[in-house]
């Protein structure tokens, strides 16, 4: 027969587990709602089959009450999911974008258009904080150890080609709290691909990305095949940009590249070690 104290303990344990389950279910429902939000464009929704946003963000462990930085959000594909999700949960979403007044003109233009897009839809994006990061000297995104998660989607290959990948990873490490998450997806090269080919093709070996993160101080916590594409052989005349959505060859072999779909991608979750 159970003692009174043991019975009370088991009851509390059951209630705690139930409460945890309910919170997790609520978070999942909110994320699904953000992914299915009618504000997202049909063009963006069609890419969910390749990018798997719900599964990817759940794998990274993103929660709505976190302070989250998205690095180089581009035209805002992930922002359209993350910003409303985090706003609803009382967290803080920070967009660390391209430099607005230096660097390639196309990046400056894209950043201005991104910020205008945010301003056009205050119901979703009025609480988004904008910061800049990138060469030559913009390497501080916020107060050290102030952020729960840093996320970046298909950007590491750009930093490698530009020669400032170390500065980027170091900046992520500084801004993250101990125990904070670094989530990365990028185009995945075959393991034996040489560095020159990586820079030219846009595909990076998973080993290289893991090493870059480790050099900055991160620990690889888990990898996932959520965004894998086994029919992408990575051998394309214009590198990864041969495939959709870019389709750099235009109409040439377009049907074949559409049939392949978007690139094979690694999905990696790193963690900044807790302080001892």
Image (tube, rainbow, N blue to C red):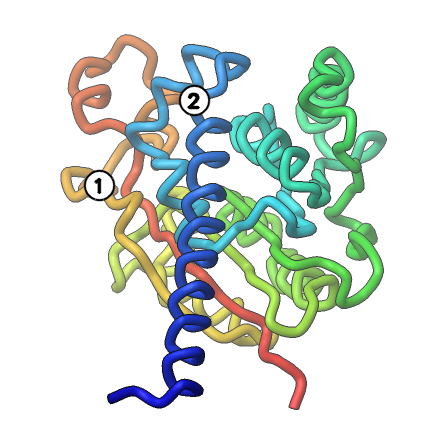
In the image, 23 versus 16, the foreground residue is 16
In the image, 253 versus 183, the foreground residue is 183
Determine whether the residue tagged by mark 2 lies in a helix, strand or loop.
Answer: loop
- 17 with respect to 97 (left or right): left
In the image, 49 versus 132, the foreground residue is 49
Residue drawn at x 60%, y 72% is: 179
Q: Quadrant of residue 45?
A: top left
- Which quadrant is the N terminus positioned in? bottom left
Determine whether the residue tagged by mark 1 lies in a helix, strand or loop.
Answer: loop
Among the two numbered marks 2 and 1 on one chain, the one whose residue lies closer to the N terminus: 2
In the image, 66 versus 174, the foreground residue is 66
Q: Quadrant of residue 55?
A: top left
Residue 184, disc = none
Residue 36, disc = 2
* Residue 238 image position (x, y, % from top left): 35, 31
* Residue 203 image position (x, y, % from top left): 37, 47
* Residue 43 image position (x, y, % from top left): 42, 13
Which residue is labeled 1 in the image?
A: 229
- 250 with respect to 275 (left or right): left
Residue drawn at x 69%, y 51% is: 67
């Amino acid at each position: 027969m159970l003692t009174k104290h043991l019975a009370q303990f088991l009851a509390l344990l059951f209630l705690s587990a139930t409460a945890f389950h309910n919170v997790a279910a609520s978070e999942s429902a909110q994320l699904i709602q953000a992914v299915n939000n009618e504000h997202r464009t049909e063009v963006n929704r069609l890419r969910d089959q390749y990018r798997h946003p719900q599964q990817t963000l759940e794998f990274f462990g993103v929660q709505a009450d976190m302070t989250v930085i998205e690095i180089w959000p581009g035209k805002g594909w992930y922002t359209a999911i993350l910003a409303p999700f985090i706003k609803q949960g009382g967290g803080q979403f920070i967009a660390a974008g391209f430099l607005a007044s230096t660097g390639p003109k196309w990046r400056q233009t894209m950043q201005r258009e991104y910020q205008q897009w945010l301003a056009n839809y205050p119901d979703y994006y009025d609480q988004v904080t904008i910061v800049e990061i990138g060469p030559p000297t913009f390497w501080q995104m916020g107060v050290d150890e102030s952020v729960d998660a840093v996320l970046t989607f298909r950007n590491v290959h750009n930093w490698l080609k530009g020669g400032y990948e170390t500065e980027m990873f170091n900046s992520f490490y500084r801004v993250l709290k101990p125990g904070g998450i670094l989530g990365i997806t990028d185009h995945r090269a075959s393991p034996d691909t040489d560095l020159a080919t990586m820079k030219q093709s846009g595909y990076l070996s998973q080993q290289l990305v893991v090493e870059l993160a480790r050099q900055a101080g991160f620990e690889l916590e888990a990898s996932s095949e959520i965004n894998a594409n086994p029919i992408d052989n990575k051998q394309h005349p214009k590198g990864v940009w041969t495939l959709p959505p870019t389709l750099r060859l235009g109409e040439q072999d377009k049907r074949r590249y559409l049939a392949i779909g978007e690139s094979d991608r690694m999905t990696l979750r790193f963690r900044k070690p807790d302080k001892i």
